[in-house]
Amino acid sequence: MPASATLTLPAVAEALDSGVVAPAATLFTPGPVMMDTETCDEGGQQMVYHRTAEFSRRILRCEALLKEACGAAAPDRVVMLTGSGTAAMEGAVLNLFSSGEKVLVVNGGDFGRRFAEIAALHGLAVEEAELAPGRPLTAEDLRPFESAGFTGLLVNHHETSTGTLMDLALLAGFCRAHGLLFVVDAIGSFLADPLDMAWSGIDALILSSQKALALPPGMSFVVLSARAVARVGTFAPCSYYLDFGRYLGDIRRGQTPFTPAVGILRQLERRLGAVLEAGVARQVAGVRALAQDFRAKLRGLPFRVFSASPSNAVTALEPLGGVPPAHYVSRLAEEFGLFVCPNGGALRDRIFRVGHLGRLTPADNTRLVAALRALAPSPRRQRAANPQE
């Protein structure tokens, strides 16, 4: 079907019958994602009161499960925030560093930039290892910052704006060599890419509910190493709600200082139990297989995988043939009920993103690729738009 064509209602019905499109909206977004039936059912249960011994046991079990799933050490503790992942990013910055301290931020895109902006807002001296969009980090990028008096290093393990995975082993070695606190936003990579907190020497690991955990948005988590726990409270807090000292005091008795997202915590307990029963490696392998399946099915279509080091979680696609990303994003949603993620900022007119998280299957990939094929320009138009090819 040429790019200029519009699917009529009979055409949509025919496509549904042929299995080209799903009968209901399907999320290929990096978050929120499709949830399994058991998670949805758990979320539909009546509320319970959280200031009880039973709920305290639930919170402590969630902490233990999170630590096991991310490879944390026994003394590590978890801060459970009712807030988005950005709340956890800001909480980690303002609880682990004091105004005037010097931090290095790996800036590979929009979320690296966000880390730098948060750190600067709280009075830290920020220097950035800035990467071209989609380019992975290398040792050469870190060399100018050796022995430069930093207190910590902040990085997004998966720079979700470009689908790029950073080299944790490289960063861990750099932090060990220079004695830096290692703060890692793993919101996009947790349970999608290999991750071991203790092995990597991570001091603060930031997670969120709506990515590969496949829960509703609304909660974020910061897993703190024993070193980070000891650092919390060594200087005056500058936030009431995000004061980690309060959370660390309450988690010891299985509580949070403020009302948590009760329903999400119940879903978290069930979901993590299922993940750990099957095995974290199996969960990661499933996401990897789904990403590889999508990328293989995409071959021959006018798209380029944008990142040179793609995460399993997301594939950033650069359309070829002169068709803007907005064409695919809007028409996939309107005509096929398939939701992919647009980009903002400098990459708005260059790429869009396809997620591989949550309750998705290879059959869903087949539907999406078929829809992309229907919306793509014909080979003749592609050659006209790209005469050098």
Image: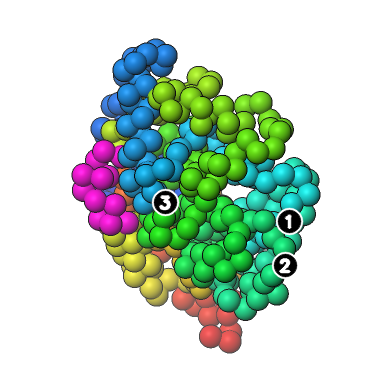
Figure check: 296 above or below 366:
below
Which dot marks residue 190? Answer: 3
* Residue 37 sits inside the magenta stretch: no
Would you say the residues marked 1 and 2 are in contact, meaning their CB atoms lie under 8 Å apart?
yes
Q: Amino acid at mark 2?
A: Ala
Q: Is residue 19 left or right of residue 91?
A: left
Residue 386 seen: yes
Q: Residue at x 38, y 35 (%)?
A: 63
The residues tagged by marks 2 and 3 sit, at their Cα atoms, a distance apart of: 30 Å
The span picked out in magenta is 272-284
Q: Earlier in the sequence, mark 1 or mark 2?
A: 1
Report the predominant secondary structure element of the magenta stretch: helix
User: Observer-nearest residue: 221 or 178?
Assistant: 178
Residue 303 in picture, x, y percent from top left: 48, 69
Q: Is the residue marked by circle 3 packed among few (<14), some (14-19), or many (20+) residues within 10 Å? A: many
Q: Which residue is mark 2?
A: 148
Figure check: 143 above or below 224:
below
Name the front one of labels 2 and 3.
2
Secondary structure at numbered mark 3:
loop
Q: Which residue is mark 1?
A: 102
The residues tagged by marks 1 and 3 sit, at their Cα atoms, a distance apart of: 27 Å
Residue farthest to the left, as pictured: 277
Q: Amino acid at mark 3?
A: Phe
Q: Residue at x 37, y 13 (%)?
A: 52
Q: Is residue 293 left or right of residue 146?
A: left
